[in-house]
Image (cartoon, rainbow, N blue to C red):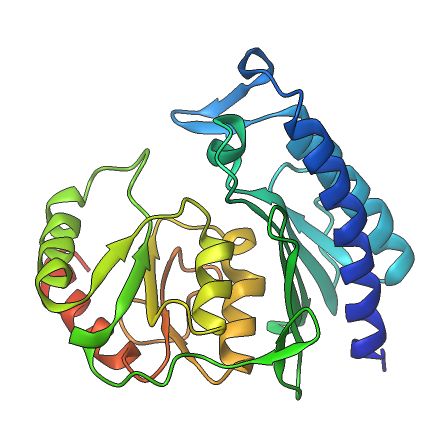
Amino acid sequence: MINLPTVNNAVRETCLQVADFIKKESTEFSRDKIEQKGFNDLVSYVDKESEQQIVNACKKILPEAGFITEEGTETIRKEEYNWIIDPLDGTTNFTHGLPVYAISIALMQHDEIVAGVVHEVNRNECFHAVKGERAYCNEKVISVSPITELNDSLLATGFPYYDFGQIEEYLRILNAFMQQTHGLRRLGSAAVDLAYVACGRFEGFFEFNLNAWDVAAGAFIVKQAGGLVTDFKGGSNYTFGREIIAGGPVQPQVTKVIQEFWKEKN
């Protein structure tokens, strides 16, 4: 049996070190160092080097664990424990000099996330939680927003950037929320969006076409902060299901609006 708080502390220390590397590189980064993994899917040497540093550290923290990583530094999955790692969530922001990006690291035991860390690099805010305990931002306990009404809520989302097959449905959803909330924000990092839901800055967050490394840690932290997390159908397939709705008490209302327009093709 591993000691989750000890593992969590070691991961947080790793994030501090990697964040220092990312911040240093951000001062000298040039767009000619950007690579394209696919249409509008960017990667840089900073992503790759950050992931290598995280993988090396995680191998020491928990040698028996496997890895699910965005950049493919290590792709060997193990039977019981696996790390789910995004070394730089918000790469497009980073490459354009926008200071909203984070390191996201989750630990999965079998099919359950048991620890998560989202380290927002520029604000130096580390959101973290382990199974059975509260969620924190640095050393402060955090909770989701207590707001109960959708029309008092500020929501976050992400826009489609490579798969536009359901853009019409998505635009209808945005139209509905524009008229029923305080507004919508698109920060460009799902990990940061989820962390901000966990600490009550956003009442809710939704997005589709996401990967496990985008949401695993953040979704877990939301739940430990007292929030609700589902897929668009209201089920639990959000870590690997490529769609997520997270929030406090307004989450069921957010889900209802999305389902009204999303049901056409799902």
Q: Which residue is at a point 81% across and 53% down the rendered structure image?
A: 14
Residue 164 vertical placement versus 180 (above, below): above
**Residue at x 80% of width, y 78% of height:** 5
Looking at the picture, tell me which residue is in the foreground, 224 or 61: 224
Image quarter (top left, top right, bottom left or bottom right) of the N terminus: bottom right
Nearer-the-camera pick, 59 or 54: 54
**As displayed, is residue 74 above or below residue 57?**
above
Relative to 35, does residue 158 appear above or below in the rendering?
below
Q: Is residue 120 left or right of residue 61?
A: left
Can residue 207 be seen here? The reply is: yes
Q: Is residue 73 visible?
A: no
Q: Position of residue 188 (x, y in %)?
A: 41, 44
The extreme top residue here reads 32
Residue 9: x and y in percent read: 81, 68
Task: Give me the residue at 35% from left, 76% from top.
Answer: 235
Q: Quadrant of residue 166?
A: top left
Please indicate whether residue 95 sits to the left or right of residue 251 in the image. right
Q: Quadrant of the C terminus?
A: bottom left
Question: How many dots with numbers?
Answer: 0
Residue 189 place in picture, x, y as percent:
46, 48
Q: Which of the two residues, 188 or 74, is positioned nearer the viewer here?
A: 188
In this rendering, the answer to whether 146 lies above or below 165 is below
Residue farthest along the bottom direction in this orientation: 132
Q: Nearer the viewer, residue 67 or 93?
A: 93
